[in-house]
Amino acid sequence: MAVPINNFTFRHEDTMTPIISDVMPSAIRSPTVLTITGSRLDSLLDVTVGPYSCPTTSVSDSQVLCEIDYALTGFYDVAVYVDSKCIVITSIIVILIIIIIF
């Protein structure tokens, strides 16, 4: 649908809007790779986990991989951005694993 605003016309195209179907895993420890699946994902530009950047390492129409190097333990929103606009938010848990060797 085209919407005229101040001599500009904006049109939303459902066929161009990325669709997110899953973000895995739902609990992580850093560093780790997140897998975002869906459709029309090849236009994704940025992924964040709370305040932490998750740079993309692989992008296709149906899958995006990003690697988060560091995050403090906590419950964070995963936000996916296209053209600096957030299109989806889900949540994951970042856990801290401590191994003590005697």
Image (spheres, rainbow, N blue to C red):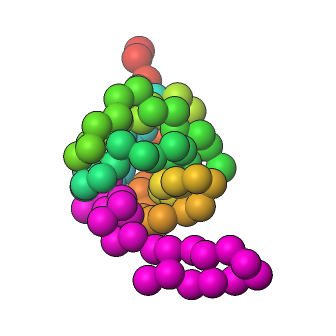
Q: Looking at the rendering, in which quadrant would you find the N terminus? A: bottom left
Residue 91 point in image, percent of width and height: 43, 63
Residue 58 point in image, percent of width and height: 35, 29
Q: Nearer the viewer, residue 45 or 72?
A: 45
* Span colored in magenta: 1-23
Q: Residue furthest right?
A: 6
Tell me which corner region of the image, top left, top right, bottom left or bottom right, holds residue 6: bottom right
Q: Nearer the viewer, residue 17 or 9?
A: 9
**Which residue is at a point 57% across and 74% down the rendered structure image?**
10
**Which residue is at a point 52% across and 38% down the rendered structure image?**
54
**Which residue is at a point 36% across and 61% down the rendered structure image?**
16
Indicate left or right for 86 with 65 as reference.
right
Tell me which corner region of the image, top left, top right, bottom left or bottom right, holds residue 3: bottom right
Residue 92 point in image, percent of width and height: 42, 57
| Residue 95 to residue 32: above or below | below
Q: Residue furthest top?
A: 102
| Residue 9 to residue 41: above or below | below
> Is residue 88 rendered magenta in the image?
no
**Which residue is at a point 59% across and 61% down the rendered structure image?**
85
| Residue 36 to residue 1: above or below | above
> Is residue 17 rendered magenta in the image?
yes
Q: Looking at the rendering, in which quadrant would you find the C terminus? A: top left
Residue 32 visible, this angle: no
Q: Nearer the viewer, residue 31 or 2?
A: 2
Residue 86 visible, this angle: yes
